Image (cartoon, helix red, strand yellow):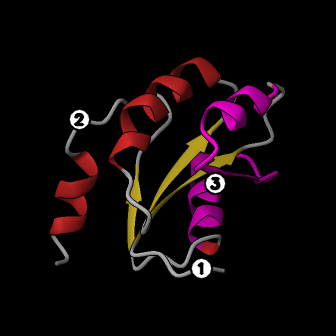
Amino acid sequence: MQYMKAAVIIPHYNDSLRLRKCLYALVPQCTNDVEVVVVDNNSSENLSLIMRDFPSIRIVIEKVKGAGAARNRGVSETTGDILCFIDSDCIPGNDWVSKATSLYD
């Protein structure tokens, strides 16, 4: 696993429309040392179009229901020293990642 400075972890369940809006705002902010991990809570939705449209993100599946289990799975999936959490129904401001990571510089 490649070392990352930071990870943005997004729990998700059957809300790909709002996840897409979140990712449109988030992904352009992420540099090569900031990864985005979407932890899907075993949705019935097909996320292949999300993966196609956002090839830089990683999607993992967590079968245990709940945002807490999804967040914990995201933590275990990253090497990021800085962990940033956002829900899939949130739209981050255009400097959300830089503000969050600058707190640790």
Left or right position of 88 against 45: left
Question: Which of the 4 image quadrants contains residue 48?
Answer: top right
Question: Which residue bears the numbered disc 3?
Answer: 70
What x and y, as percent, mark residue 32?
44, 63
- Contact flag, marks 3 and 1 (Cβ < 8 Å): no
What x and y, as percent, mark residue 103?
15, 69
Nearer to us: label 1 or label 2: 1
Give the residues in magenta: 46-75
In the rendered structure, does residue 63 fall within the stretch colored magenta? yes
Question: Which residue bears the numbered disc 2?
Answer: 93
Q: Residues within 10 Å of mark 2 (few under 14, many from 20)?
A: few
Vertical side of 69 occupied by 16: above or below: above
Quote the CA–CA distance across marks 3 and 2: 23 Å
- Contact flag, marks 1 and 2 (Cβ < 8 Å): no
> Which quadrant would the N terminus be assigned to in this image?
bottom right
Name the residue rendered at 35%, 29% in the picture: 91
Name the residue rendered at 76%, 31% in the picture: 47
Vertical side of 27 occupied by 50: above or below: above
Left or right position of 50 against 83: right
